[in-house]
Image: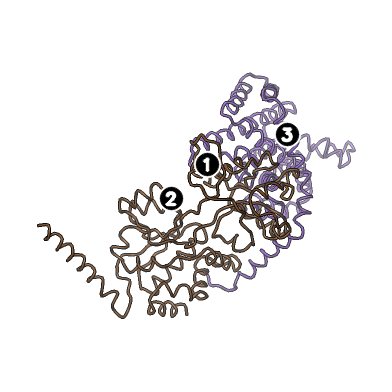
Chain colours: A purple, B brown
Amino acid sequence: MFPEFVDTRPLRRAVDDALNWVVANWGGAFEAAARPLLGLLNAIQFALLATPWWVIIALVTLAAWLATRQWKLPAIVFAALIFLGVMDLWEDAMITTALMIAATLTAIVVSIPVGVWMSRSLRVRQVITPILDLMQTLPSFVYLIPTVMIFGPGKIPALLATIVYAAPPLVRLTDLGLRSVDPAVIEASRAFGANPGQRLLGVQIPLALPTILAGINQTTMMALAMVVIASMIGAGGLGYQVLQGIGRLEVSRGLFAGLGIVVLAIIFDRVTQSFGKQLQARIGLQEVRI
Amino acid sequence: MKHFWKGTLAAAIIGFAAASMPVQAADETVCGTDRSIDIAEMSWPSAAALARIHAFILENGYGCDVEVVSGDTVPTSSSMLSRGSPAIAPELWTSSIEKQWTEAINEGKVVKLSDAITDGTLEGWFIPRYVQEAHPDLKSVADVIAHPELFPDPEDPTEGRLYSCPPGWACEISTSALFEAYDMAEAGWNLFSPGSGGALDASIARAFLRNEPILFYYWGPTSILGKYDAVPLDMGPVDAEIYACNTNPDCDQPSRKTAYPSSPAIVGAAAWVPEDAPVVADYFAKVGLTNDEISALLVYGDENKADAAATAENFLRERKDVWTTWVPDDVAAKVEASLG
C-alpha cells in the first residue's frame, strides 16, 4: 500500500463544499445561461415530432439518394426508418435524434473555430490537446452528477455532457485538415495577394473540408454513443428504453432500443459519409486517411 | 416403539442443548464454529456499513473467522440459497425477491435471523420542510397536487414536476401508477424520470442547497433523508392488493391510490448458520436498528467522506449505548479494546 502522506479528506470536503457553494449561489444563473441551448434542442425536437413520419422518411431517403445517386443506400435508409416505426420506437428515436443534432450543431459552432485557432499556433495546440484528451477519457459520470447539480436535471446537462464527449474529434480533425493543406498552395495564394482571412476561407477550409466532414461524421457518432449515458440524467429517448430494459431484465426492450440506436447511427454515418465522398470527388482529392 | 422414538428425540434435543451449553456458560464467549462467516456487503451505503459493523464485532469480539464479500440483492440471495454462501446478508430487502425467498425459507435453505430495520422502512413522496413551513396546508398528496405552481418544472414552468424513480426500479412502476391514479397529468403535473439514482440524488441536493421547492419520490433509511430535512406526505392507508396490482404490468385494472407498503429489510442467513454457529445466530437476532439510527450513521459517512469500514468504526465508537446491548459484556470489552 502507498503510505499515507496527507489526509485527503479535507481536500475532498473542500471540493464538495465549493460545488455546493456554486450550486447555492450560481445555480440559477448557470441554468439561465444554458436556456438558449435548451431552446435549440426543444425547437429541433418539436419540429421532428410535429413533422409526419412519412415526410421524414421521404426526406431522409431523398437525402440518401442525393448523396449517392444509387438505389442501394436509400433502400437501406428506408428499411431502417421503417424498422424504427414498426418497432414502436419512432418517438424515442426522434427525441434521440434531436439531442444528437443539437449536440452536433453546437459542437460544430464551438469546435471549428477552436480547430482553426489550434492549427495556427503551436502553443494553443499544446494547451488544448491535453484538454481534449481529458474530455474524451474522463468517465462521464464524474462530471455528469456535478452538471446535474449546477444546471438541474434534464436535457441541459444531457446536452452538455454529449457536447463534451462529441466535440474533441471535430476539433482534432479540423486542426489536422488545416495543417495538411499543401504549403505550396498556401504559398501560391499568398503570391496572388490573398489576405489571411481570404486564405483561410477561400483556400484552407475548402481544401480541408473532407477532413472536417470526417470530423463531423465522428461527432455525430460520438453523440449517439452518449445517448444511453445522457438518458441516465433525464434526457429520455432510446437510451431511456435501454435503461428500462436493463433495470427490469427485459432483454427484448433493451435489445430493440439498442438496435434502434444502431439504426440511427447507420443512417447518419452512411449519409454524411456519402456526402463527404461526393464532395471529395468534386474537389478532386484522394480520400483523406486519418 | 412410539415412546422409544420420543425418548431418543428428547435425548437428542437435550444432548444438543447440552453440547451448545458450554459455549454459553463459559466465562469467555467464543465464535463456536470453524467455518468462515462470509458477510455480504451490498452496494448501497447502509447495508455496506452494517456489514462492516457486524464483521468488526464478530471478528474482534467473538474471534470468528470473518470475510466481507461484495454483493447485491439478487446475486447474494441466489448464491445464499444455492450454495449457503455468503452466510449472512445484514440488510436484505426481500420484497423484490419475495417468491424465491419464501420458497427457500420453506425448503429450509435460508433463515431470517431478525429485522435489520426495526421500525420498518420508509417509502413515499417528500417535500422539503421549508416548503411545508411556508405553506402549512401542504400535508397530504392531495394538498400538493392542488398546487402544481409551487413545484414548477424548469423545462415547462407552467406545469409542476414530480421527480420519479430511476428507470427499471420497482418504484418506477408504482410511482407512475400513482401518478395516474391521482390524475396528476390532468392537474398540471409532469412525471419526470431522473434516469439514475445518482441524478435523483443530485436533483434533490440541488433543490435543498438552493432552498427551492421539490416534490420527489424517496425511500429510507438513506443518507439523503438523514442529511436533508424532508417531510413525507400523507398518502393515506396502505392497500396491499392495490399496490400489488399497480406494480404488476399484467394487472388490467386501472391504477388506484394507495400508500407504499413498508418493505421488510431483514438479516438473512444461510440455514447452516443457526445450526453450526448458534452464537453468531444469537448475536444477529438482536442487531436491529431504527431508521433514524441508520440515517445518522450514513450522514457521518457522507459528511466525512468515510468509506463503509470507517463509518462502521465511528458507529462502534460513538454509539456504545446501542451495540453493547447486542453482545455479552466480555465481547463488548474485547471490541472496545480493539477499537483502541
Q: Name the residue under label 1.
A: B246
* Dot 2 or dot 1, earlier in sequence: 2
Seen as rendered, the residue at the extreme left is: B1
Three-letter residue code for mark 1: Asn
Tag shown at residue B74: 2
Residue plotted at (22% across, 67% down): B16
Task: Tell me how far mark 2 sits from mark 3, CA to CA.
Answer: 41 Å
Q: Can residue A130 be seen?
A: no
A290 or B305, which lies in front?
A: B305
Q: In the rendered view, would you say B307 is above or below B160?
A: below
Q: What residue type is labelled 2?
A: Val
Q: Residues within 10 Å of mark 1 (few under 14, many from 20)?
A: many
Residue A84 locus on image (x, y percent): 59, 28
Q: In the picture provided, is A21 more to the left or to the right than A248? A: right
Residue B82 in the image: state x and y as whole percent.
33, 51
Give the amino acid type for the residue marked by disc 3 in the picture.
Answer: Phe
